[in-house]
Image (cartoon, helix red, strand yellow):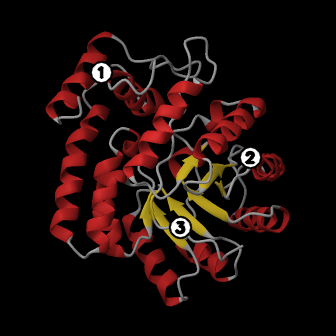
Amino acid sequence: MSDFRIRGVVPPVVTPDTPDHELDVPSFERLINRMIEAGVDGLFFLGSSGEVVFSTDERRDQIVREAVRIVDGRVPVLVGIIDTETERAIAHGKRAIALGADALVATAPFYALGTMADVERHFRILHDELDAPLFAYDIPVCVHTKLPWKLLAKLGAEGVLAGVKDSSGDDISFRYLCQENERLGHPMSILTGHEIVVDGAYLSGADGSVPGLANVEPYGYVRMWQAAQAGDWATAKAEQDKLNELSHIFDVTTGVAGYGGGVGAFKTALMLMGVFSSNTMPRPVAELEGANVEAIRKVLVDCGVI
């Protein structure tokens, strides 16, 4: 399973909700088709942006089923099997594979925190019991465990991991991981989720990016990847700088934080752009309203998005 490779732009797809908290399938189709038409290289469903921890098992299955149907083989489909402990992650993984996922993405266990030896066993068990390429998702802000780069490199070299999605914000660890991955013969696809410094990650040796902001502006991330592949670092930086201006949709709001401010900003922008029918958030998170919506609208206008 370590033969699976993916490179380029792999957005973590935002999940649209109807006002009565059902999956908004027409909005989902518009979003997915728009990113594929922009030239993305894969799509990651049921990640942090995709409401994975807000979704029942039945809703997770629905999201994966619709995603596979809409994508229709045009790009690889990565699916998050994120849950508190190993047995639940295995159950999610088996269903995702049956529904057509091309690769699986798992975090360290959380809630009942254990030792690093437990974390290593978690990934080894997932690899042994799930017949699909496995990516480790390093997101300590949510799971309260930082995945050490030496452990990730070891698991990659042994064929346990096909890749890493790094959202740790630890650029030193990321750089070491890229170098060690190269030294070992590049057994893993290393993807950065640090969307504000993607150009720097490419220069460090990243194989691609998983930028949430690509839900709103996929074209710029695709152009940046293409520029980096051509060694045109001035253009890559220019594209990153433009995307960073757009990223201020995160910080122009007031009275919100965390998921409501981050994914809430994505959903509000997509609603204002006509991609989503509403900016409904999963309960108990409130959607952005009033002045916050207008503040995001101004960023979109100033950046030429609408």
The vertical placement of 96 against 227, above or below, is above
Left or right, residue 219 beside residue 33: left
- Mark 3 or mark 1, which is nearer the start of the sequence? 3
List x then y, in percent, for residue 162: 63, 70
Q: State which quadrant residue 273 falls in.
A: top left
The image quadrant where one finds the N terminus is bottom right
Q: State which quadrant residue 268 falls in.
A: top left
Q: As rendered, which of 20 and 48 lies closer to the eye?
A: 20
Mark 1, residue position: 254
- Mark 2 or mark 3, which is nearer the start of the sequence? 3
Task: Please give the name of the residue rendered at 70% of the width and 82% of the height, measured from the top-left corner.
Answer: 158
CA gap, disc 1 and disc 2: 34 Å
- Mark 2 or mark 1, which is nearer the start of the sequence? 2
- Few, some or many C-alpha atoms within 10 Å of disc 1 (few <14, some 14-19, many ≥20)? few
- Hey, what amino acid is under mark 1? Thr
Mark 3, residue position: 6
- Hey, what amino acid is under mark 2? Ala
State the mark number for residue 112. 2
Task: Please give the name of the residue rendered at 54% of the width and 25% of the height, measured from the top-left corner.
Answer: 26
